[in-house]
Image (spheres, rainbow, N blue to C red):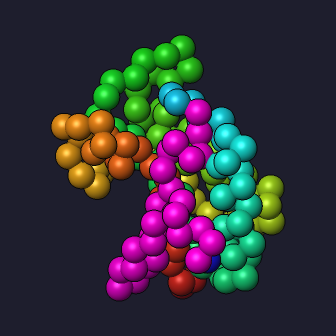
Amino acid sequence: MSHLKDRVSVREAKDAIKLAISDSILFFPADAALSRSGEKVLEELAVMLKQRPWHILVEGHTDNQSISTPRYLSNWELSSARATSVTRYLIRRGIAPQRLSAIGYADTRPLTSNDSEQGRSKNRRVALVLRAPD
């Protein structure tokens, strides 16, 4: 996975591995449609994920800036739609649906302060939480 290190951050916890990918790599602004660069990163991850039996929780996260578009009335809809887009892409790449869950957290779990553009940028992400099967 070293070829992904500049695009995916990896954090290990006692019971899980968390892979975080910036929204700017995966999506167009204020949208849940995957960009070509997002598809490429997920394609590389899918190859690795198919080799392990992990359960994969796909988490969508946003910053605290309000969004209100005809398609996404709030950050709840946007974060959920982004998690769903990533989940559907992984299924198309051969990950069994029963291994996947998708959840949108909106801005409720920031990594850092939303007081600057740099902080907001870090908070806009999709995380794949990998857990060993029960």
The image position of residue 97, as x and y in percent, is 71, 62
**Residue drawn at the location 45% of the way across and 66% of the way down:** 9
Name the spot of residue 55 as percent of width and height, x first.
58, 73
Say which residue appears at 59% left-offset and 33% top-offset.
28
Range covered by the magenta-colored residues:
2-28
Q: Quadrant of residue 11?
A: bottom left
Q: Is residue 27 above or below residue 58?
A: above
Q: How many marks?
A: 0
In the foreground, 54 or 61: 61
Image quadrant where one finds the N terminus = bottom right
- Quadrant in the picture for the C terminus: bottom right
**Residue, far top:** 70
Question: Does the magenta-highlighted stretch encompass residue 4?
Answer: yes
Residue 121 appears in view: yes
* Relative vertical location of residue 129 with respect to residue 7 in this rendering, above or below: below
Residue 3 appears at what percent x and percent y? Answer: 63, 72
Looking at the picture, tell me which residue is in the foreground, 1 or 57.
1
Q: Residue at x 52, y 64 (%)?
A: 6
Does residue 132 appear to the left or right of 91 in the view shown? left
- Please report the residue visible at 28 percent of the width from the left and 50 percent of the height from the top: 110
Residue 67, by quadrant, is top left
Residue 84 seen in this snapshot: no
The answer to if 111 sits in the magenta stretch is no
